[in-house]
Image (cartoon, rainbow, N blue to C red):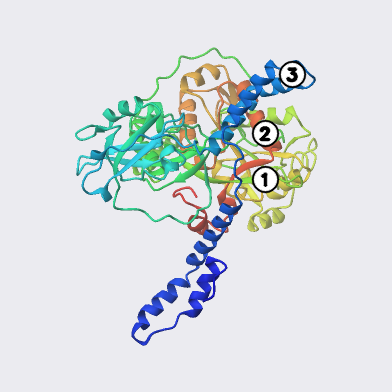
Amino acid sequence: MVKCCSSFSGLIMLMSGLEAHPDREEDYRFLHSMLREKKIHLLFKIHERLKLFEKRRPIPAQEHSAVLASNLMEELMHQSSRDGLTDLVAILSKPHLKSLLSVHDAVAQRDYEPMLPPIPDDFVPDEEDSVKIVSLVITKEPLGATIKRDESTGTIVVARVLKGGAADKSGLIHEGDELKEVNGVPLEHRKPKEILPLLARSKGEVTFKIIPSFYRQEASSPRKKLFVRALFDYNPEEDPTVPCKEAALGFKRGDVLQIFSLEDETWWQACHHGDGQSHAGLIPSQQLHERRVALQRPRALFKPRTPKAPDEAQVLEDVDYRAITGFHIGKTPGGLRRSFRLGRKGNVAREAARSRRWSAGVHGSIKPPTYIEVIPYHRAPTDRHRLVVLVGPSGVGVSELKKRLLISDPDRYAVSVPYTTRERRKQETDAVDYHFVPLHKFEEDILHHRFIEYGRYKGHYYGLSLDSLDKVLAEDKVCLLDLHPSNMKRVYTAEYRPFVVFVKPPRIEELRLTRRRAKFICVEEDKNPVRTFTEEDFEEMIDTSESMEREYGHRFDMVLVNGDIAAAFRELKAAVLTIAEAEVQWITTEWVCPSPTTARRSCSHLTGWI
C-alpha cells in the first residue's frame, strides 16, 4: 500500500485505482463523475492549505504579557535610578503599549469572541431542525432588517435584510424567516410596532428565536456594481409609507447612489457613493415613485388660475437676454432670442399647449424622472472639455446666465458662432457675428445632419452647426450652448458628454416680485414692441418649465432655480468650474451603449429612462 503524500494526490490515486465491477457499473460511474468534479478538487486543495497553515501558524510565546509587563514595571520602580530604567518605566506605562499587550493576550487566549449565555433546555421545541437561535452583539450600526406581519398567518416575519447591516453580515437572518421570540419574549399576537421597544431595551446583545423560511434563493453570480443618479429629492421623515424610517436613506437630486438590491418592487436597497457607509438603506423604487407622481398629478393639473397682479409702474429696464454672438433675429417674453424655433402666439396657442400637457399628464404617457444609471468617467488631460448646455423656458434668464458666465472668464468659456444664408452687413464680421454661407452649402449640411437646430426667418436660414461647436472645443475651451431640450439629441452623445443645466423659474409669487419692473422686446408682429411681463407670461413660463422637466428631466444633470440672478449665477459658475476641473465625473451609461435598443437590453437594470 502506497502512503499518500497529500489528500489531493490521494484523491488522484483513488480515481486511478477504481475498477468497475460488473454488478456495480452504475455506482462506479456515479462515484467516478463525482470525484472528477472541479469543486471536489478545489475543496481538497483548500484542505491542504489549511493543514499547512495550521502547522506554520505563529504560536504566542506568552499568554499573559500584560501582567508580566505590569509586574516588571513595579519592580523597576523600586530599583535605584540608573541610566535607561527611567525610560523603560515610561515606555511600559504608556497606555498605547498597555492596550497593545492586552489585545495580544486576548488573541493568544482566543478571548475575542462575545460571551453568549447558554441556551436553556426548554428553549428549543421538539422539532429542533425547524428552529434556530441567533444572538447578535449590539453595536452602533443598525441591525439592518425590517419586519412585517404575514397577512395569511398573522406571524411576524423578516421583510428584508439590508445589505451591509449586522443581520446581513451574520449570515444567520434571511428574508422570510419567522420571528418567534426576542430576548425570550414571545411575539405571538404582537404588532410590528410593539417589537421595536423590545429591541431598544436590549443591552450588549439581542437574541432571536427564528423559524427559518423554507425557501432559500440560490446565491446569484457576482453582478457588476450598479450606480444611479437620483433625479428627485427624497426625505424619509416626510414619507409615511416607508417601512422603517431609521432604515431609510434620504437623498437630494443629483446624488450618486450605489444600488445593492432591486428585488423588492417598492423599496430598493442603496447607499450614497463615497460617504464611507458600508450598509444599505431603503429608497423608493422607480415604480413606486412613478405611481406617487401619477396620483399627485391630477391635483396639480386642476389648480385654480392665479389672479392677475395689479399694474406696475411703467419703468423701462433692459433685460435683453440675447446671445453674445449678436444673434437676435427675434424676441420672445423676457427678451430671449427666439433661436430657430417658431414662437407660440396668442391665447389660442397657449390653451392648445395646456390641453396637450393636460392630456399627457392624465394618460401618463410621459414618465416622471426617477433614477438614471451612471458610470464613472475619468477625464484624461488630452480629453476635450464637456459641453455645457443650458435649457429652460422663455423668459427664465438662460441667455443672461450664459452671458454672465462668458464675461466672467473669456479665456475659459466661449460660444459657438451660428450660420446663416443672408448677406453680410457692413458692421458684421464673418466667423465672429455669423458664418455666412451660400444656400446650397447650408442645405447640404442639413442633409448631412450637421446642424444641432436650424430654422428660416424672412426667407433666410439660420442654424447652429456641429462644426462651429467643434471649433470651440478644439481651442480647449468650455463651450456654452443654450437649446430647447428637444434639440439635444445631436449633442447628447459620448463625443460631447454634455453637462445639462435646467434653469427653472421660482414660484409665481417670487416671479411677480423679481420681474415686476422688467420689460422685454416682443416679436416684430406685436403691436406693442416693448412691454412688461403679464400674468399669462408667468403662467406660461411655469407651465412650460413643468412640461420640460416632466419630459426631459432624466437628462438634466443640474436644476437651477433662477429667482435671484446673482445667486443663480454663482451657483452655476461653481458647478461648471467643478465639471471643467474634476478628474472623475459621472456620466450616463446611454453614451457607452451601442444603440438605444441594446442599451435597454444590456446596459440597464432599470426601466423607463435607459
Q: Which residue is mark 1?
A: 378
Q: Which residue is mark 3?
A: 86
Q: Examine the rendered structure and indicate whether residue 545 appears above or below residue 511.
A: below
* Mark 3 or mark 1, whichever is nearer to me: 3
Pointer 3: residues within 10 angstroms few (<14), some, or many (20+)?
some
Residue 545 screen position, x and y as percent: 49, 33
Amino acid type of disc 1? His
Q: Quadrant of residue 555?
A: top right
Residue 495 screen position, x and y as percent: 66, 51
Q: Residue furthest top?
A: 313
Residue at figure coordinates x 44%, y 48% from the top left? 608
Front-most of 412 and 460?
412
Front-most of 497 and 176?
176
Q: Do tag 3 and tag 1 residues touch (Cβ < 8 Å)?
A: no
Amino acid type of disc 2? Thr
Pointer 2: residues within 10 angstroms few (<14), some, or many (20+)?
few
Residue 433 screen position, x and y as percent: 75, 38
Residue 270 screen position, x and y as percent: 47, 40
Q: Which residue is mark 2?
A: 578
Residue at figure coordinates x 69%, y 27% from the top left? 404
Q: Do tag 1 and tag 2 residues touch (Cβ < 8 Å)?
A: no
Front-most of 472 and 202?
202
Task: Using the rendered image of the protein, determine whether residue 525 is visible from the camera's viewpoint.
Answer: no
Amino acid type of disc 3? Thr
